[in-house]
Image (cartoon, coloured by chain):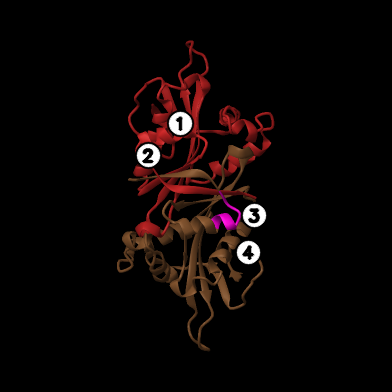
Chain colours: A red, B brown
């Protein structure tokens, strides 16, 4: 996976036909489609109504601590368009606790149906860890819905510890 | 609790002798002392070595999405200094998922030993919820160490749901 980013670079590319880059406004429909193509996302997202996502994208794009990423696979045919295969949102958060530690938060990780089982999820998270380290973070964190048991095993394999409970309140 | 903040205002004050305001650089030693006065914080914080905290404070203070708050109680004697009694860090995070929902993250909640059992923790969290709502957040989230069983009950009483596992990795 290679990175093409004005804000940062990640680890060396394991596959030369994959690009991980910061998303642009033109990527919003593809990212929303991936967010919606998921057991929980299907109930929450409205890929047919993009205005709220476009508004949110502008806010993300204007904040240097937000890294909304899209992974693309090279075109299947020469000259064709690249295929979006994954997405991830990394937020850098300064803080006082843990000796003034900056932490990062991973949200909205999705791998396209066509790319599941290829190791792309691992590559996305490994990029997020490497980028967090590059930005001086002392801690990377994420929450995973209690029903996503496979995801829990995935994060533990990657070295995360399920040390906390994640509390949420919708407003 | 009243608020005195350039960035936002919270709910009406339940106690006129409490002020909740954005922290300044001068508050860093008091906040670090509260972070350290805790079963987990005692192992993580270095209140005798403030430089990393001061550096982190500058970064927090320069980011309009960070709200590092300190709660103060009126002086015990007329003309005396106010007493720091609590702290909380609220981060506002734009995002694409959940129809472009902005979410907030609560970190580093502490109530001074002298003020425990007074309802101040509830006031801090209620302020964070109200401020999140005021800023258009659709979701408030936090993680709590799995060992903090009393804290879990506290957050559930306030309306949070322990719907997620919280994964962390130190770098």
Q: Position of residue A47 (x, y in %)?
A: 65, 30
Residue depicted at x 56% and y 69%: B119
The residue identified by callout 2 is: A129
Where residue B133 is drawn, which disc sits there? 3
Where residue B17 is drawn, which disc sits there? none
In this rendering, the answer to whether A103 lies above or below A36 is below
Where residue A150 is drawn, which disc sits there? 1
* Whether label 1 touches label 4, CB < 8 Å: no
In the image, the segment drawn in magenta is B155-161
Q: Secondary structure at mark 4?
A: loop
Q: CA distance from mark 2 to mark 1?
A: 20 Å
Residue depicted at x 41% and y 20%: A17
Residue depicted at x 62% and y 50%: B137
Q: Nearer the viewer, mark 1 or mark 4?
A: 1
Mark with earlier residue (2, 1): 2
User: In the rendered view, does B137 fall on the left or right side of B168?
Assistant: right
Based on the picture, tell me whether residue B157 belongs to the magenta stretch: yes
User: In the figure, residue A9 lies in which quadrant?
Assistant: top left
Q: CA distance from mark 1 to mark 4?
A: 40 Å
The residue identified by callout 4 is: B10
């Amino acid at each position: 996976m290679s990175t093409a980013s004005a804000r940062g670079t990640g680890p060396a590319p394991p596959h030369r036909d994959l690009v991980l880059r910061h998303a642009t406004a033109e990527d919003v429909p593809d990212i929303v489609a991936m967010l919606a193509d998921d057991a929980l996302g299907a109930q929450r997202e409205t890929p047919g109504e993009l205005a709220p996502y476009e508004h949110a994208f502008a806010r993300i794009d204007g904040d240097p601590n937000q890294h909304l990423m899209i992974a693309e696979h090279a075109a299947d045919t020469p000259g064709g368009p690249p295929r979006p295969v994954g997405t991830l949102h990394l937020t850098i958060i300064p803080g006082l606790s843990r000796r003034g530690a900056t932490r990062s938060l991973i949200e909205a990780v999705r791998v396209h149906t066509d790319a599941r089982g290829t190791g792309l999820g691992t590559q996305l998270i490994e990029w997020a860890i490497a980028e967090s380290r590059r930005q001086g973070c002392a801690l990377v964190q994420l929450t995973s819905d209690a029903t996503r048991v496979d995801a829990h095993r995935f994060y533990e394999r990657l070295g995360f510890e399920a040390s906390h409970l994640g509390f949420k309140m919708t407003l």
